[in-house]
Image (cartoon, grey):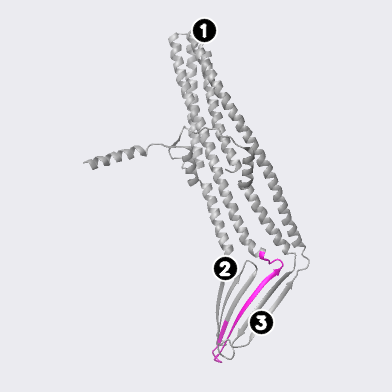
Amino acid sequence: MNKITTFFIVLFICFLLVGQEKTMSLQNCIEYALKNSPELKKEKIDLLRQELNTIEAQAAFAFSLNANSDYAMKEDETSNSITLSKEFRNGLNVSMSADASLDYDDKSDSSGMSITLSKQILGGDSRLENTNIIDDSIIDEIIIANNLRKIRRSLIFSVKKSFYKIIRFQQSMTIQQRRLEQAKRNLEFARAKENPLDIATAEIEVPSNQLSLITAERIIEREIDSLKEILGMPIEENVSISKQFDFKITNRSSADDIDFALNNHEDFLNNKLYLHKYKLDAEIAKYSLYPDVSLSAKFSKDSRGATVNLNGDDEQTYMLTARWELGRRSFKADYQSKLYNISEKKLDYYILKQNKIKTIKELLLYLRERVKAIKIQGKKITFQKKQVMLFNDRWENGEIDILELIRSQNSLENSKVTLIQQKTGYMELYAEYLYEIGR
C-alpha cells in the first residue's frame, strides 16, 4: 500500500512539473548557449575540418610504398618491381627500389636493386617550401581556434546584453504594476473626498497605466524570444528569466587592460599569425629567384647470370643538376607582392592597436560616468520620496489638487525606472568592456 501511495505521489509531482516554466538565471543562459548555439557549433566544425587538412598535409611526408607486376603475353615475360620512398621536411628524398623479371622462353631471370638519395640545395624547391604546406595548415588551425574563442566570447556578450535588457523591462514592469496600484488607491481616496476634479484626474491615470503594463508584457515576451534565438533554444519552449541580477561596480586599470588586449585579444593574435605566414611566403618567393640546384647519389646492384642473385656489378652515380629559367620577372613581381603583404599586415596591426586603445579608454570613461550617474540618481530618489510624502500630506489637508500628487508620484517612479536603466546599462557596458579587452 505504501509503495502504491508513493508511486502516485511521484506521478502527481511529475505531472505538476511538466507544465511549469523553467526559470533561467544569467549563468544558466550562458551555459545553455555554449552548448546549443548553432554559430558556435559551425565554427567547431570548421576547426575539426582544418585539423583534418593538417593531417593530410603531414601525410605528404609519410613513407610511400609502390608495387607493380606486369606480364607480357607476346614475349611470355613477367616483371615485378617494388619501391619504398620517403620525403623529409628538410628537402631530402630517399628511394629504395627492387625489380625482378622472368623470361619463360629463355628460362632466364634477372633482378636489380637501387638506393637513391637526392636533395634540393638551392632554388624554389627549398626546405621552406616543402614544410610551408604543413606550417600554413597549422597556423590556419590556430587562427580558427582563435576565431572560435572570439565567437564564444561574443556569444557570452550577446547573452548578457539580451539578459540585462529583459531585466530592465521586467523591473520596469514591476514599477509599472506599482504605479497602477497607486493609481487605483488615488482614485479611491479621491472618491472618498468627493472632489469631481480629483476624481476625473485619478480616473484617467488608471487606464493609462493599464495600457503601459500591457505594452511592457508584450515587449518582455518579444525580448525573451530574441534571447532564445541567441541561446539556440526552440522558440516554442516555455521559459522565464530570473528577475534578479548581481549588480556590482568594478574598478579597472586601463593600462593593464590595454596590455592584456594587445597580448591576448584574438584580433592581435591572428594578425601576428598572418604576419608569420606572409614572412614565410616571402622567404619562399625569394628562393624562387635563385637557380634550382639539386644533388643526388644512386647506388645500384644487378644479378649475375640468368638467376636472381644480386651478384653482378655495382654501380654508383653522383649527379649535380642546375636549372635556371631565363626571364624570371614574374618571380620578382611575386616576391615584391609578398613583401607588400607584410607591410600591409604591419599597418593593420598599428590601426588595430590605435582603435583598440581608443575603444578601451572610451568605454572606461563611460563606465566611470555611469557610476557617478547611478550615485546621483540614488540621491535624487531619496529626495523625491520625501517630496511625495509632503505632497501627500498637503493633498490630504486640501492644500493642493491630486494632480500635483500624481505628478510627484510618477516622477518618483520614473526616477526608479531610470536607476534600473542605469544599473543594467552599466552591466551591459561592463560586459562590452570585457569583450573588447579579450576576457
Asked if residue 300 is positioned above or below residue 136 in the image, the reply reads below
Q: Sort mark 2 into few (<14), some (14-19) or many (20+) by Cα contacts within 10 Å.
A: few
Q: Nearer the viewer, residue 260 or 136?
A: 260
Q: Position of residue 240 (x, y in %)?
A: 44, 35
Image-based side of 45 in relation to 5, left or right = right
Q: Which residue, as the protein is rendered here, is positioned at the far left?
A: 1
Provide the residue span drawn in magenta.
Answer: 99-127
**Would you name the residue on which mark 1 appears?**
399
The circle drawn on residue 373 is none
Q: Which of 183 and 52 is in front in this view?
A: 52
Residue for point 61% across, 47% down: 266
**Would you name the residue on which mark 3 appears?**
316
Image-based side of 46 in relation to 255, left or right = left
Q: Distance between the residues labelled 3 and 2?
A: 27 Å
Residue for point 56% across, 49% down: 148
Magenta stretch holds residue 113: yes
Image-based side of 42 in relation to 278, left or right = left
Q: First in sequence, mark 1 or 3: give its number.
A: 3
Local SS, label 2: loop
Q: First in sequence, mark 2 or 1: give its number.
A: 2
